[in-house]
Amino acid sequence: MSFKNNIIVGFMLFAMFFGAGNLIFPPGLGFDSGQYFWMAIIGFVITGVGLPLIGVIAGSISKDGYRESLKVVHPIFAIIFMVIIYLAIGPFFAIPRTATTAYEMAMVPFINGTGWVSLLIFTLVFFGIVFALSYNPSRMVDNIGRFLTPVLLVTIIALIVKAITMYIGNDSGAAAESFDSTSPFSVGFTEGYLTMDAIAAIAFSVIVLNSIRSLGVTKRKDLLIETIKSASIAAFLLGVIYISLGWIGNHVSPSVSQPEDQNLGTFLLTFVAEDSFGQFGTILLGVIVAVACLTTATGLVVAVSEYFNSILPKISYETFVIIFTLISLVLANQGLTQVIQTSVPVLSIIYPIAMASVALLFLTYFIPSPRLSFQIPIYLIIVTSILAVVHRNGWFDFGWIENMPLFQSSFEWIPVMVIGYIVGYLIGMKQERVKYS
């Protein structure tokens, strides 16, 4: 495959992950982390950029992607985990977040405060358009997306360049009182969960595979190599943008107070846009983000509805569109802050399972291993992640879990994965080795 085609696929992959909703997290992290910025942003980039692209690469191990490869654990696990992932990147978290992000960036700067009435009216209009576009999907949404992604990218780059020249002389602010200065890396790492791109990579990796195959690459080894090349291009672009936005958040000193009900990231981006380009900057950024969120939400409704229709064909695609649009509408009216807060514990359970699955896919691909060496660590991580989240949120006291290695850094699942793999390998030493088709 030529380098030109690598660039084409790389930009396609970049566009898949470059959601307008993700732009709000790096500035907020930069602002809160203060003097601990670099450790925090490195952790964020690993989960917000590195893991999604590694996830895409791991998807090329099996010709049918994760739907097939996760059957190594168990066919039922493969279905349940994929369902959970589609619900997370769909109606439960990602789709409502697109609406609330659009509201806070396109509406809040131009009205006096926030309120449930204005949010309800906005989301009714927003999801009315999403429903109309999703009910009869066509090339129109794809074409709008192809136009908006470059425009959003150019706008963000212009904002970044202007803001850096304005704030280059500013020192980092002090870390927020709520920021855990003892573990800045793990704070950034877990903050990267909120992008949801690592789990989205599991759902969408087959799209990248099909794109590379359509360019004449068919051998498994070549698919892996070309996926790595294309993913590296997307990773570079995403990394530069996230680090730059985080740096801006770390050096900006807002001259106005953050509205109580507004998300920190949206507040900072809106302030920087106005500080850089005046009222025009606020309007331009708000409109572009709103329309980008609209097309992202439509694409997600279509993708999730098509997936559920494929596993439950007796229920029509149109019915799923109605169901998922209504669920997203209801959840969006919690507001952006509540949507994010609700997603944190769920993502804290899903992410270790997803990261372990990707790691074990690579490991069992390059090191012939018995099925148990994949199954045992995944089952143990499911239990460990649930118990850890329950304990951290104070829902039930499992004091013993704090004695687990790396618990304080939220990486307790790593020793569990290593030990589980070794135990599974030893127990299943005489079993047939895992093979990926």
Image (cartoon, helix red, strand yellow):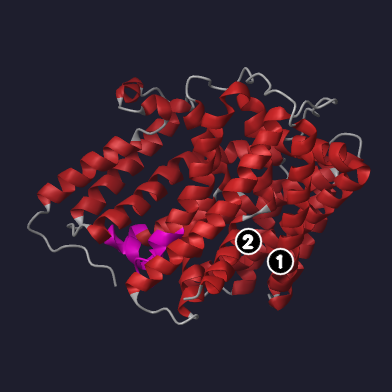
Q: Could you tell me which secondary element the residue under label 2 belongs to? A: helix
Residues in magenta, as a range? 56-77
Which image quarter: residue 63? bottom left
Across and down, in percent, residue 378 comes to: 30, 48
Any magenta on residue 62?
A: yes
Q: Which residue is mark 2?
A: 15
The residue closer to the viewer here, 22 or 319, is 22
Visible residue check, residue 46: yes
Q: From the viewer's perspective, is residue 255 above or below residue 362?
A: above
Identified at 86% across, 51% down, the residue is: 284
Amino acid under disc 2: Ala
From the image, state whether disc 2 or disc 1 is nearer to you: 2
Find the distance from the CA under tag 2 to the CA under tag 1: 9 Å
For the residues bearing labels 2 and 1, Cβ distance under 8 angstroms: yes
The residue closer to the viewer here, 321 or 45, is 45
Any magenta on residue 63?
A: yes
Across and down, in percent, residue 352 comes to: 40, 43
Across and down, in percent, residue 98 comes to: 70, 51
Across and down, in percent, residue 224 comes to: 38, 67
Q: Quadrant of the C terminus?
A: bottom left
357 left or right, relative to 240: left
Which image quarter: residue 5? bottom right
Q: Which residue is mark 1?
A: 145
424 left or right, relative to 65: left
Identified at 59% across, 66% down, the residue is: 12
Identified at 54% across, 52% down, the residue is: 197
Q: Could you tell me which secondary element the residue under label 1 belongs to? A: helix
The residue closer to the viewer here, 169 or 141, is 169
**Which callout, 2 or 1, points at the residue further toward the start of the chain?**
2
Amino acid under disc 1: Gly
110 left or right, relative to 58: right
Which image quarter: residue 423? top left
